[in-house]
Amino acid sequence: MKIARIGELQRIKEKGLKKILPNKPRISIGLGTCGIGNGAMDVHQAFDKAFAKKKMDVTLTKTGCFGFCAEEPLVNIHFPGQPLVILHKVVPADVPSIVSMIAEEKIPFKKALCRIEEWDFITGRIVFGHGLSRIPLWHQIPFFSGQKKIVLRDCGLINPEDIEEYIAVGGYGPLHKALHEFSPEGVIAEVKKSKLRGRGGAGFPTGVKWELMRKETADKKYVICNADEGDPGAYMNRNEIESDPHMVLEGMMIAAFAMGADEGAFYIRAEYPLAVERLKQAIKSSREYGLLGANILGSKFNFDVTLVEGAGAFVCGEETALIASIEGRAGRPRPRPPFPAQKGLFGKPTNINNVETLSNIPAIMAAGPEWLMKTGTEKSVGTKVFSLVGKIKNTGLVELPLGTSLKTLVYNIGGGTGTDKKVKSIQSGGPSGGCIPVELFDTPVDYESLNALGSIMGSGGMVVMDEDNCMVDVARYFTEFTTCESCGKCTPCREGLFQALRILKAVTQGRATARDLDVLQALGEVISDTALCGLGQTGPNPILTTLKYFRNEYEAHIHSQRCQAGVCTELFLSPCENSCPLHMNIPGFAALLKEKKLPEAFESVLRDNPLPAVTGRICPLHCQKRCRREDVDEPLAPGEVHRYIADTVYQEKKETKIYNEILKEKFPPTHKKIAIIGAGPAGLTAAFYLVRLGHDVTVYESRPEAGGVLRYGIPEYRLPKAVLNKEVGFIKKLGVNFVFNKPVDVQEFKAIEKRHDAVFAATGAYKNMLLGIPGDNLRGVLSGTAFLEDVLTRKAPLIGKNVVVIGAGNVAIDAARTASRIGSSVTIVYRREKDDMPAHEDEICEAEKEGVRFVFLAAPKVIKADKKGAVKGIEVSKMVPGAYDLSGRKKPVATSEAYEIPCDTVIVAIGERVESGFLKEGGIILNNNGTVHINKATCQTNRFNVFAGGDLVLGPATAVEAMAHGKKAAAHIDWILTAQDRFDKLFKKFNYENEVPLETIEARGEPERLLDVKDRENNFCQVSLGLSRLQVEKEVTRCLRCDVKENGVCHE
Amino acid sequence: MLKKMGFAMNEKMMHIKIDNKDYEILEGTTLLAACRKAGIDVPALCYLEGVNEEAACSVCVVEVKGAKVLMRSCATLVREGMEILTNTARVRKARRMNMELLLAGHADDCFTCDRSQTCTLKKLAFNMGIREIRFPKATRVEMEPDASGYSLIRDPNKCILCRRCISVCAKVQSVHAIDVTHRGKASFVSTFMGRGLAHTECINCGQCLLVCPTGAIVENNAIDSVWKALNDKTRIVLVQTAPAVRAAIGEEFGMPAGSLVTGKMAAALRRLGFAKVFDTQFTADLTIMEEGYELIDRIQNKGPLPLISSCSPGWVKFAEHFFPGILENLSTCKSPQQMFGALAKTFYAQKLGVDPRKIVVVSVMPCTAKKFEAQRPEMNAAFTYWKSKMQLNEDDGFPDVDYCLTTREAARMMKEAGINFLHLADESFDEPLGVSTGAGVIFGATGGVMEAALRTTYEVLTKQPLGKLEFHDLRGMKGIKTAEVNINGLPVKVAVAHGLGHARHLMEEVQAGKSPYAFIEIMSCPGGCIGGGGQPIPTDAEIRKKRMAALYQEDEGKKIRKSHENPAIISLYKEFLEAPMSEIAHHLLHTHYAERTLGKEEFLLRTHQVQHTIEKEELRLEEHKESLKLLHDQLTTLNKNYLREQLAALSKNYLDSISFVSHELKAILSSLVINVYTIKEECLGEINPKQKKVFDSVARHLDYFSVTVRNFFDLGRIEKGELMLRKAPLSLKEDIFDASIEVFSKHANERGMKIVNSIEPGLKIDADADLLSVAANNLIGNAVKYGHDGGRIIVTAQSFDHRLQVEVYNDGRPISNSESDKLFKKFSRLEAPETKLSRGTGLGLFITKEIIKKHKGRIWAEAREAGNAFIFQIAKG
């Protein structure tokens, strides 16, 4: 059945078309490795059986992968004359119902992902049919919306094992065209004109490369296709070969013809058994059809290919190493020149192209170079296939026009992380690519832009990382890979990567010094600059980019021995302890409580956190987000546990003994005087520790009582003031002097500084930001914090019946719920969507229950006044969600549409700012936004004896983070005043069993007990009632005890 | 200028800039060569022109304008308009960093390193201004040095993986004994399967050592052995020095290459304490005589031609490995070193009149392979010579040459001895083994053997003096040199090769039978012995040429320049060897060769390895077995515990039922028995005999029944631990046994048995009367039951200090040992004829035992002659 003439090719094309568009239903299952891995084989079998049983006249066949790996197994259903429908996540159990629907010629809408009406195969076009508008068109699915399929044009639509189907969609037409309508030079001219660049990573212009090879005169020339895809996390080439082997083969034939080669070799990873099998099959059928061999398609062109399986060395992707490997030698690169085009395989001129480069060739030959240039950017033409993996919702193969931004890739196509964790970085180009931070996601994906950031295009791996990824560990991981894969020939790669890995390991284990970072930086630069081949030259990219964009993480590991992401296990007790700003020993107090040692549990909690009952109520629970129990069922609620511990101890009056003990341990007086400005959570915490160290501590507070935002900002129903009084009481009892009603201005600050040995400033963030719209100074416009303070201090707030709260943070919610309790009807107005609200999810939920209304996508435009000059309403612009911004949220865009919300009070809670003027005047350096600039590890300002912390440094943050600053500052103040490591002596080791629960019985977290909604009206009773004794006892048994390590190593 | 393959070589000049100055450089030149031409010494570590161009070390980098990365100057060719910067901060930073990385990976025991003075790494580190190594040590793999070979020792921890050794071995010598194995940081230079040089085709030429930039390859040092020999006053230590040494050893003392220091060398060796300083050139002349005559013989007798020289031990091993088919073409002559050894311990020993075993022969050689040659087992001609004469044993064997020193080692000894080499006055060699000709001198250079041989063979064959002694075609550094000599009108073609890569070409011709040559000289090392692996470092092409020139200069200065004219040789033949190729010459001066098949060794080694693996696996299996056993034991214990628990639960149940049932039955039975007996004994009136018979039977059954119930009742108490001891003083005979005997007397009488109670009356004991009675009843009852009719039952008691021993004897079938073991077990009844007759619960003796145990005593059974005794001992109080 050798094809020699165009007519024969045409005949097979028609034959193939009848296979793709038969006059009966055609069902094809996506049987790529990804599909098979998700159980597509079973699905195929189930269909086969069901059709046989029902004796149905349908075509059941297989295809490759359509790219959406997260939705596998994919099944295509096509009834004659109708659009092709792609079903997703089909499991064998779905098959019977689908089959019976097919029998009735119905579409199983429930399982339908998208439909395809017609398809541009570039080499040809197929119309499947029209209709079924219930199902979205394929490019209406976000995952496909930005994609353009050139390389993946056939993938998932034709049977990769049937050459006739490939011919049916126009396959081997381009080859025929090249052989009969072009000279070899003509083909090269076309490729050159198309500006196609090598898709293997380096981006060398393909046409130029071919031309160099063409010019070589030799009795023998080779072309090689590099399918040795060794990057972890990248599988484009595998899929391309599995789904469409003939496309690569045809590209190679055209290349061979253009360059005058008569023999080709596929160098393919042996770990890709399916790709190897399909490629073998494709080669076999090509030979049968006369497409390989002598006088191909009736021309004088002779060509055949060999398949070489690579043993999986990463370095064999480098062309000289690859050649050595094919020749049977160890895969080690050699210096170039001579280039392979001069002296390649067996000493003969050789051209090596990547799978994807070759896949572009038939398309260029079919549609012309100008066509390709319509896609992509001026310098980076066409598309590139990426494998999108990592912390991303929609994993899969993505073919993007070059120049598309990373933002589009990650958020539009990838759908973000799919969890409440934020995207932190993306690593492009495999293990030797760089990590690009989310701040730079506006970058277009093209060769030059990625290089400018210190990364590479590489073969197209894209690994997304979120906040749970430690960037130092990421660098270590990739460096370990390249170190293992280094061939060992040149010094910088062999010795340099090894030493770099040593340093990185030292960093992750907290053993590194600041100097190590300098050495690491220099080392990375030199390796890049002097390594012999691409592996070594790009190997340090993960190191250099993380050093560049995430240096703070390295510094935290080195200076504070902290791994914020909770990855480097040597540096912390447990993930929860690590994420707690106060580093409370959560597994410890849970274990103590489990053993019914309530007083010890309380003591442990108190020593770590002077306000356990308070924080137990209001903490946003950083710990809970990191709890590994989440992988089993639900995370633990440590906040509820320490709230219970403190509440119960107070109730049972067991605290006195512990208080007395702590009082007794107080260090002898040091006669050092310390001033703390601000009695908020940060100041109180600093005072708690410093006074116990024997210092003379005085707290200056502008308000009449201690507590700061805890007292004047958080409504009673969230935090009863009795609880606060109890815990502040102990701090007072410890001997801290309080000077109330003492606002500190610059003169006072200077005086205080003079009188004391050290000053800790923590005055918080109270200044409300203004709306900056007409009418924002009208009577009836209040600030959120002021309103809350008025209510808390029993001043009658001036609010009307209809209140609009502007903002979506916790202050806004507090204000709204407070106003609602006073009896107003409250509406929250927010310019973005609900999911974008920064407030705590539970709070939003409770507010809704309490009758607070929400208006989303509305931005205040003007506040209208009545005749008396009081507020009568607020006019808002209607917003629509626009493109994603770098926070991963859609940016609201104003429309011309506006409407008015009538109201008599507007509470503005769009954020608070710090008042740090007195410090600036006092000579303390501030950041641009007015917060105080400190050394993050010590809380020290530019003056050695002045420290600052809390919101004053962070801007509006949580109380616990402020307390953490107080704790950190206390430790360092003590250190500078005494030059001794005494701080650790304030803590105690408790004895409890260190046993990991051997079997984990699934037990979901205990539900929070809440006050009934109708009981909340018109009062400020505490809403959250905490957990009962039984609930807490159950809760602590759920702890997985991540703190228990054997020889410093975590349990498996 | 270096021209890379694959490039058109049209001698074009390229206009380039080096550090902003203009240069014209020939196309195809490397940047390194260009820079050097421009007077800039770019540091290079791995590069070895024409040999090692792997671009591995990354030290020679330079900045090329427009290039993204730094370029390796050794592997980059000049291009038109190229601008090169060699001294920028970027370049220095990269060079230093790479150097530091290499140094961190190098075991730097510089004080004790052989290459301390000649280490390129050390020199470059100094030149590049390395003041600190910012990285922790990371030596290769903490591997043991490979000291398996006789000549060379390789230490991977000092290796910086420059690959020079590999390239020399593969490209120059075509031996391929070593290569890099593993990858990345774990890679190191190794031999096939890592089994050591001795087990490879390594020919010990030492070219790898010469090119090694560090001390990773050194010779197997013989200095200490030689010092030891020199210190031994009972021995005569002779030294011989090869021709190439005198042209090179001066370099070790700072003299320029090519300095001829024959006289100083002889003087220095004498200062070291050698008894006689001889010259290997003497035996070189002798070699020419033997080899020349061999050639003549082969030409005349159509022996295998070409004749191939055999002076170079590396070459000989090479031939034995790679060209076993042409071994018969090799001259059978030993090398001059070995001829010398053989003569020193025969001819010279005889001359001195000393025991040859007293003589130590040390050679100073430019060669590392000589160390290997000297230890070849067949190189013991002197021993063979003396063996029968002196009646020696095999164990007394000694080699012809004892120790081989390289030129470097000899120089080090001189330095150690504090000899001021440069100021020594010339001295001459000792006689007679120190007399030589110009022919012997030129042995040290490639082509020299051939030239010397031609001088002699020509004259011997033509009987005419040779007009011009110099064969210039055979001199110089060309890899393969050929010449044609007309001897008696016959054109004789000869060839010379140095470097085994070149030799391989000639040998392939020979093997194919296409060689046109009559005589071929082969030297392993490039340049011949003057470029040998034992020569001073550095040894490069320029230095080789200079050393060669020195040898030719000495030849020219010699009065006698033909071997056959050497008077000492002439007299040696006269006095001792008779004639060339004589029988004695054959014994002492000729040798044989054999194919070296690594295959066989390989097979053995592999077998050994497999065995080793099997053993290891077996060991592991054993371990597994062990752990399995442990596991099994654990399981068993677990199982047992489980069973025990289950059993305990079960048995509690069972005991409760026994106690309950037996207790209930006991009460009912008592009244039943009384009633039956009352009727049977006719207390309630007369009964007829038929009725009596029935009642007798009923009573008998009831008796048995009550005994059984009682037993069970007791058993229940025992097992539940309720057997309480209520001790009271009692008299054993009266209170216990008399009563028991009374109970059974009726039965006994019925069977004609006699029961004797010989317990001492009034024997007092503190015990529980009830329980002891039960025991006594059981014992007596058994005795009655199992004794035979008409037999005796004797009860005796013996009193000890605190114990009392009671024995109940009865005539009957003696119980066997195995049976007696079972006796006291619960529910155990003997399968014996007598038990079939009588019924029993199998509980009696168990209960008895428990009772006795309760009394802190023990019970056992003893078989006697015609009966059995049941004996128990209890405490008296």
Image: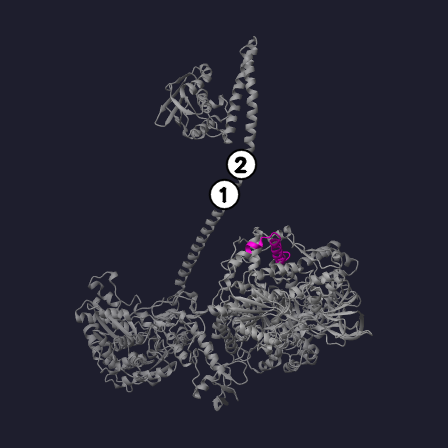
In the displayed orientation, state which residue is furthest to the left: B353
Q: Are marks 2 and 1 in contact (CB under 8 Å)?
A: no
Quarter of the rendering occupied by the N terminus of chain A: bottom right
Q: Name the residue carrying label 1.
A: B637
Q: Name the residue carrying label 2.
A: B648
Is B248 on the left or on the right of A795, as rendered? Answer: left
Is A870 on the left or on the right of A383, as rendered? Answer: right
Identify the image quadrant of residue B802: top left
Residue B770 visible within the image:
yes
Residue A644 belongs to the span the image colors magenta: yes
Q: Chain of mark 2?
A: B
Residue A231: horizontal and vertical position, in percent?
Answer: 58, 69
Q: Residue at x 53, y 21 (%)?
A: B706
Q: Chain of mark 1?
A: B
Residue A157 visible within the image:
no
Task: Give the residues in magenta.
Answer: A630-658
Residue A878 belongs to the span the image colors magenta: no
